[in-house]
């Protein structure tokens, strides 16, 4: 997979802010970001997993069920769906994100965007959006 975020402001922000990085808050923000993508380019199979992650319910049975759905989605014949499912798998499997994990998840989302839009159209817009969302978290 291409490194979509290597020359972005969000990459630099995550590098600089990694000392005061709040992995729990960044995880919540990236769940919201996945939901934002889902609203733009919806996949029915991702509705339940996103609702589970957004609700932040702690249920082992539901976790296993949702994780199984995400594994199926990650292997479907649609690259953008695969990428979002991989991002959600990383989010569901990790309680507290590191800066590197956040970058990996964002890169999955940028890869998904690249299936639907030209890089020059989505990278500046999504980079600015993420910087705004994550700046308050990494600088506080």
Image: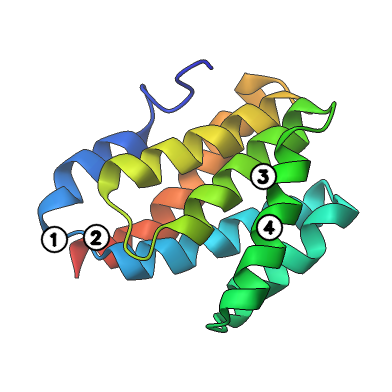
Task: Tell which circle, 1 or 3, labels the residue nearer the N-terminal end.
Answer: 1
- Where in the figure is residue 57, as x and y percent of width and height? 57, 84
Q: Is residue 103 left or right of residue 139?
A: right
User: Percent position (x, y) of residue 112?
Assistant: 68, 32
Give the residue at the far top of this rendering. 2
Secondary-structure class at tag 4:
helix
Q: Which mark is residue 138?
A: 2
Task: Determine which residue is flagged by label 4.
Answer: 36
Mark closer to the observer (3, 4): 3
Work out how far the residue at label 3 is from the one at label 4, CA to CA, in angstroms. 14 Å
Compute the Cα span from label 1 to label 2. 6 Å
Q: Residue at x 76, y 54 (%)?
A: 69
35 sits to left or right of 99: right
Give neighbour class at mark 3: few <14, some 14-19, many 20+ (Cα, 10 Å). many
The answer to the question of whether label 1 and label 2 lie on touching residues, with beta carbons closer than 8 A, is yes
Q: Is residue 107 above or below residue 84?
A: above
Residue under the image location 69 percent in, 45 percent down: 71
* Residue 20: mark: 1
Q: Are marks 1 and 4 in contact (CB under 8 Å)?
A: no
Which of the two marks, 3 or 2, is nearer to us in this view?
3
- In whole angstroms, how far apart are the C-alphas of marks 1 and 4? 26 Å
Q: Nearer the viewer, residue 27 or 70?
A: 70
Q: CA distance from mark 3 to mark 2?
A: 25 Å
Q: Which of the two discs, 4 and 2, labels the residue nearer the N terminus? A: 4
Residue, disc 3: 85
How many marks can you see?
4
The first of marks 1 and 2 along the sequence is 1
């Amino acid at each position: 997979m291409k490194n979509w975020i290597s020359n972005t402001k969000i990459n630099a922000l995550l590098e600089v802010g990694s000392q005061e990085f709040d992995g729990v808050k960044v995880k919540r923000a990236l769940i919201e970001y996945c939901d934002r993508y889902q609203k733009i380019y919806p996949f029915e199979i991702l509705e339940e997993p996103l609702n589970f992650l957004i609700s932040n319910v702690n249920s082992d049975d539901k976790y296993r069920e949702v994780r199984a759905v995400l594994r199926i989605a990650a292997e479907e014949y649609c690259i953008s769906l695969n990428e979002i499912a991989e991002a959600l798998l990383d989010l569901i499997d990790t309680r507290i994100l590191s800066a590197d994990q956040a970058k990996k998840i964002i890169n999955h989302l940028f890869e998904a965007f690249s299936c639907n839009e030209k890089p020059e159209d989505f990278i500046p817009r999504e980079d600015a959006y993420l910087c705004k969302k994550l700046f308050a978290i990494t600088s506080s």
